[in-house]
Image: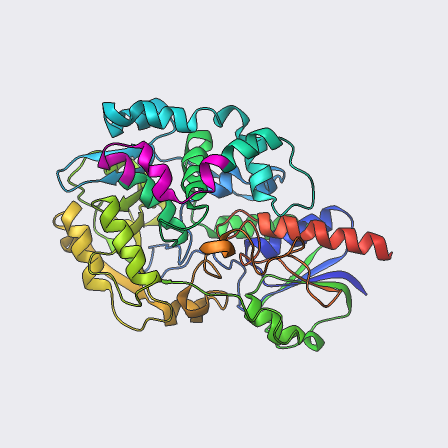
Amino acid sequence: MLDAVVVGAGPNGLTAAVELARRGFSVAVFEARDTVGGGARTEELTLPGFRHDPCSAAHPLGINSPAFRAMPLDRYGLEWLQPPLPMAHPFPDGTAAVLSRSVAETAASFGPRDAGAYRRLVEPFLPRWDTLLRDFMSLPATSLPRDPATLARFGLAGIPPATWLMRRFRDERARALFAGLVAHVIAPLDGIATGAVGLVFALAAHARGWPVARGGSQAVSDALTAYLKDLGGTVHTDYEVKRLDDLPPARAYVFDTSPTALARIAGLGRSFEGYRYGAAAFKIDYALDGPVPWTAEAPRAAGTVQIGASSKEIGTALRAASREGRAPDAPFLITVQPGVVDPSRAPEGKHVFWAYGHVPHGWQGDLTDAIERQLERFAPGFRDRVLARATAGPPELAARNANYVGGDIACGAASGLQLLLRPRPTLFPYATRHPAVFICSSATPPGPGVHGMSGHNAAKAVWKRLRSTS
């Protein structure tokens, strides 16, 4: 009998498996698709030689992840590449604010009226960043906070809505960039703890940047898989699990799946009936015959570029998709251009480019024209660079990854109390009413992103149970 079986070979499932194997437990992973990866894959979606990331592409939480940093993933081929600028946020007047590794450079891009306010906001946390992040990403904890005082100060700044925190800024440049940071989790700006979301992304950039993985995000998943195999774990792909009886006998079963799928497979009935899925993404992967022709200079050097003319425009787009059930006329866009630092992703002189906007849950329309109108506002002539595009709305995203229910790439709405208490209000979010069944997906704390911490935290709960029953 195995000690643990993990269902789903995304970053969280693989991390959970590694953490258990590192502690001497026998582990097997079962993945429905024919390759590992989940939200960290790389595929030729458009033309031969153009290697795209179907979901996550830039990894500020990955390089900062306490779980990943404790693993020798570089020995298994994972190499983080740092763009000259982590992120840029252009404006219609041809200028841009930036999120730089340097706090001073970032603050200066906001203008003199907000430079001091930004420095006062972020600088107190940077000296204790690693401890703060571990405490923040381990809550609800299987261990006590290591620095409760800093965590409490962070909570005072971050628990209120982002709209409150943004009142510190007098001008639109800082407000728009910060609003864009919050929008990475598709959360309306006036939601609880959205200030913390923006702060985490900003601090992550200042601490270690917003890198891409050389060759694509698949490198993250491949490194985790190779490490797991060296630890004695096994991985089975092209193996769909429809019920627990489809799996070999084990002392524990760990699911990197949506709560909906877990309840169905494990026979948990209505255990997660209150769990909410949120707004969806509409994503386009482009093959380009050259770099994006940004009007502003800063975005040309940035790995990630946020597109939203103002905090008001960003807030309007988020409300439309999350609360009003309609696609925004001017969608907020998150874009990634890996070729700024990794020319291996496309043939010589060509580029891959990644962009998505937010749409209602399960939306079946086409946002392509609205996305490209937004891009043309800040990069005139963009459409002339397009060689091919691969579009994926909510139905296509859900078909690619079963965790993206209705196109929700966060595996559950990251808003309201569910941003903090997922998949249900409990001090034991990784356990279920079945004593041998656990959940480790992005539906558990600390939530979405390629960081493996949901898997790490769940593994703690699992190995404590395995040791108590051995």
Task: Find out whether residue 381 is within the magenta segment.
Answer: no
Magenta: main secondary structure equals helix
Asked if residue 171 can be seen in this view, the reply is yes
User: What is the quadrant of the C terminus in the image?
Assistant: bottom right
Q: Quadrant of residue 98?
A: top left
Q: Is residue 3 left or right of residue 288?
A: right
Q: Is residue 427 left or right of residue 167?
A: right
Q: Quadrant of residue 196?
A: top left
Span highlighted in magenta in the image: 156-175
Give the residue at x 55% y 34%. 152
Q: Quadrant of residue 128?
A: top right
Q: How many marks?
A: 0
User: What is the quadrant of the N terminus in the image?
Assistant: bottom right
Q: Nearer the viewer, residue 17 or 197?
A: 197
Task: Find out whether residue 171 is within the magenta segment.
Answer: yes
Give the residue at x 69% y 46%. 142
Residue 403 screen position, x and y as percent: 50, 65
Above or below: residue 219 compared with residue 172: below
Residue 446 screen position, x and y as percent: 55, 49
Q: Nearer the viewer, residue 164 or 445?
A: 164
